[in-house]
Image (cartoon, rainbow, N blue to C red):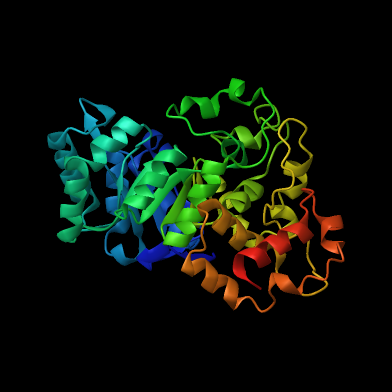
Amino acid sequence: MNYRTLGRTGLTVSEIGLGSEYFAKQTVEAGVALVNAATGAGVNYFDLFNPEPHVRDVFGIAMQGRRGEFIMQAHLCSAWIDGQYKRTRDMDQVKAAFTDLMTRLKTDYIDVGMVHYVDEQKDFDQVFGGPVIEFAKEQKAAGHIRHIGMSTHNPRVAIQAVKSGLIDVIMFSINPAYDILPPNEDINVMFDKASYETVLANIDPERQELYSLCESQGVAITVMKPYGGGSLLSAEASPFGAAMSVAQCLHYCLTRPGVATVLAGAVNKEELMEAVAYCDASDAEKDYAKLLSSCPAHPFTDKCMYCGHCAPCTAGIDIASVNKFADLCQAQRMVPETVREHYNVLSVKASACVKCGQCETRCPFGVKIVEHMQKAVDIFGE
């Protein structure tokens, strides 16, 4: 297993985490076995949005006597009311659900208290201008929540959350299909094939801004829906008309700026192990470049996807890293000091480009790399 730092929290997390979407359909015994298989494979980051009592019991049992092996991202405002899941902003329900969460987990703290599912502007205003965020801050002050997070599918809302300064972790839906769509308050557009009937190309600028902002501010992104609800794994269901592999989907997510871990959904141990196998996959197995550069409906062109196909550079420039740092600055229309520091650490700067163009002949996305190196020089001064 490979590990990354969860942004400014300083926590060390597994690149592959485990989501809990499918736990509701399993017995407690099967759920505990799946969690144990995950920890045995090196997974230490888990998302628990489920309010179902038996799902919470799974993690409480699995963590017994080894709480320190788990970094738990558990959700506020997700409640079990009259035998059904409910997203709620009613504070009596929020507080009761949080008490139930802590009791069933048999712990006195959760690592990331995730404000659950904020997609609409009206909802964001209510949450961040009302008692929900105050409750989260109170629990953090009391030590019951170590860090505050928020889950959303809307980059516009996510950007506001990051800029609030209150959020350390954003749970966000990332995959190549969702990345080409503009922001929308309705999550259903992501699953609707009609959303992809017009030709869309490259990453939506607000999504790029979110990734760049998170990277520069130290706000970690934990990824949900890396497979697009499974549609990207099927040629028939994918908007690209070609199937991606699990490794390709995970690699795409993990090459986005700001991403710390991808929460893979798994119905059973076999699906979990397929995701964990990413860590030992070859570069060829993880490579998504050919598929995304050649899809007829939604081509990615003249946009660096950080895939590394341009290497090796004649002058020794790490082209993908230079482009990533430059993109971070362009998305925010400024040069964050953290990004400048990362650029300064590079042993060879963009100014070393000899304009031979060899990299451009290898780029599957038609990126005008020589021009991009000059843009980087203009941004960073060398």
Q: Nearer the viewer, residue 217 or 374?
A: 374
* Image coordinates for residue 265, horizontal then vertical, percent: 49, 43
Horizontal side of 169 relative to 81 (left or right) equals: right
Residue name at image x 51 percent, y 25 percent: 189
Horizontal side of 8 relative to 202 (left or right) equals: left
Q: Quadrant of the C terminus?
A: bottom right
Horizontal side of 348 relative to 342 (left or right) equals: right
Residue sitting farthest toward the left: 92
Q: Nearer the viewer, residue 133 or 15?
A: 133
Q: Nearer the viewer, residue 328 or 364?
A: 328
Residue 280 versus residue 239 in the image, above or below: below
Residue name at image x 20 percent, y 42 percent: 132
Residue name at image x 22 percent, y 41 percent: 129
Horizontal side of 141 relative to 208 (left or right) equals: left
Residue name at image x 47 percent, y 30 percent: 184
Locate residue 346: give its quadrant: bottom right
Residue 107 versus residue 96 in the image, above or below: below
Q: Nearer the viewer, residue 274 or 301?
A: 301
* Image coordinates for residue 68, horizontal then vertical, percent: 31, 66
Residue sitting farthest toward the top: 194
Is residue 72 among the parts visible in the rendering?
A: yes
Q: How many marks?
A: 0
Q: Quadrant of the N terminus?
A: bottom right
* Image coordinates for residue 72, horizontal then vertical, percent: 33, 55
Is residue 37 among the parts visible in the rendering?
A: no
* Image coordinates for residue 144, horizontal then vertical, percent: 19, 57
